[in-house]
Amino acid sequence: MVLMAMRWAKRWCAWTLPATLAILALAACTESERLPGAPAISAVIPANASARVVFSAPAHAGASAIATYVASCTRSGETISARGEASPIDVWGLRNGMDYACTVRASNAAGMGQSSAAVTVRPAPEPADSLAAAYQRAAWARGMVVTFASPCSMSVWPNARPSHAVDAEYLTPIAPTGGVRQASAVALTRISAMPLEVSAWDSPATHAPMQFNVCPSKAPSPTPINTGAIGVMISGAVLFGAAEVRGSRATALRDTVAYAWRDRAGVQRLARFMDLCKGHPTPGGGGSIYHYHGHSECVTRLVDQDKGPSHLIGVALDGFPIYGDKDMNGQTIGPQRLDGCNGINSPTPEFPLGVYHYVLPAGVTQNNAAMRCYSGAVARETLAAEDATGYCYGAAPGVAAPPTKAMVMDKGPRP
């Protein structure tokens, strides 16, 4: 009788035997017979930064009822899992455009059972909801070229001049080379003490074509921004970080000065380091590329209405969109609501269900005036290429500050 009970227990792990035989039955059960068998995946459906795993229950539940299922998707040593009580299970947080091997396991009171066979999936957004679709509809300035080599690859050719008005002359830094050129300094920036001279902006340069992965996902850790362009704006110009000089506490919006003088004809002239659109060109040696260092009303008003929400105004190097600082109700999104990279996940006119995007807060002149890091992955080659477009200066020794009356800060919005 006991031998018969043990044989039945080993085959079925039966728990309905009399109590005196149940102990022997439990001892006879092997580990594999107590645990659930392997589920069978029938489909893995790709979606935006996610995958839906559809499966059937294992033929053998084990010694007790199945309590939960775990779906896991793995690539390059990174595994993202989700739990559910039945099929299907959605696994979120995947990187669009990357291949994942997805499996399912079942668990009961005895533990986790066997894994299903792996099925490969490549997450991608629905065409109508994708960033690529929004970027195709964006209000790019006339003359800009925007192309898509694939659903996840976008190239943008910025314009030499932005679509809004710019100054004819700017205060531009003098490279600290010593000698005669430093004698032409007419002002110093307020904080970093860079010597400045008046330069006519009559030979604007076009930034090199920029490449974007428009199927981005958030990386495990942020990447510090580079020198030079960190994004492209719908006005045709590019966006730099808040600081003009790498590693400096000074930001361009705090460092700015203006210089007023009369020319030989007695006409009053004015040159600014940052114009009223919160932008300026890099010096001639840096390519004469017009760029911003933060929020610019000259850009936001191209698409936004008073008291309305912010619309798409640019794309960051990691592929995520850039917006102004108004939510869907036209209320200001304060810096305290943003993450360390100036990002937030919230609805926008282009993405009413929500999207991760960067915010350029109006009136902010500190280092959070623009993105301080990238939440998404950016290729090293891309960072290196943009680093080359930045033109950094340090204070030149031996340059005396000009008279105080020559340094006049810009105040008030553009009329």
Image: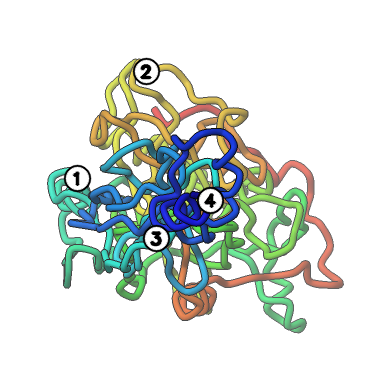
**Can you tell which mark lies on residue 139?**
1
Which residue is painted at 65% across and 46% down in the image? 367
Q: For the residues marked 3 and 4, what is the alpha-carbon distance in whole angstroms?
A: 45 Å
Cα–Cα span, label 1 and label 3: 37 Å
Residue at 16% across / 61% down in the picture?
143
Mark 3 touches mark 2? (CB < 8 Å): no
Amino acid type, callout 1 = Ala
**Do we see residue 178 in this rendering?**
yes
Dot 3 falls on a residue whose secondary structure is strand
Of mark 1 and mark 3, the one earlier in the sequence is 3
The residue nearer to you, when weighing 301 against 261, is 301
Q: Earlier in the sequence, mark 2 or mark 4?
A: 4
Q: Which residue is mark 2?
A: 330
Nearer the N terminus, badge 3 or badge 2? 3
Residues 140 and 143: in front is 140
Q: CA distance from mark 2 to mark 4?
A: 77 Å
Kindly identify which residue carries mark 4.
2
Does residue 319 appear to the left or right of 120 in the view shown?
Answer: right
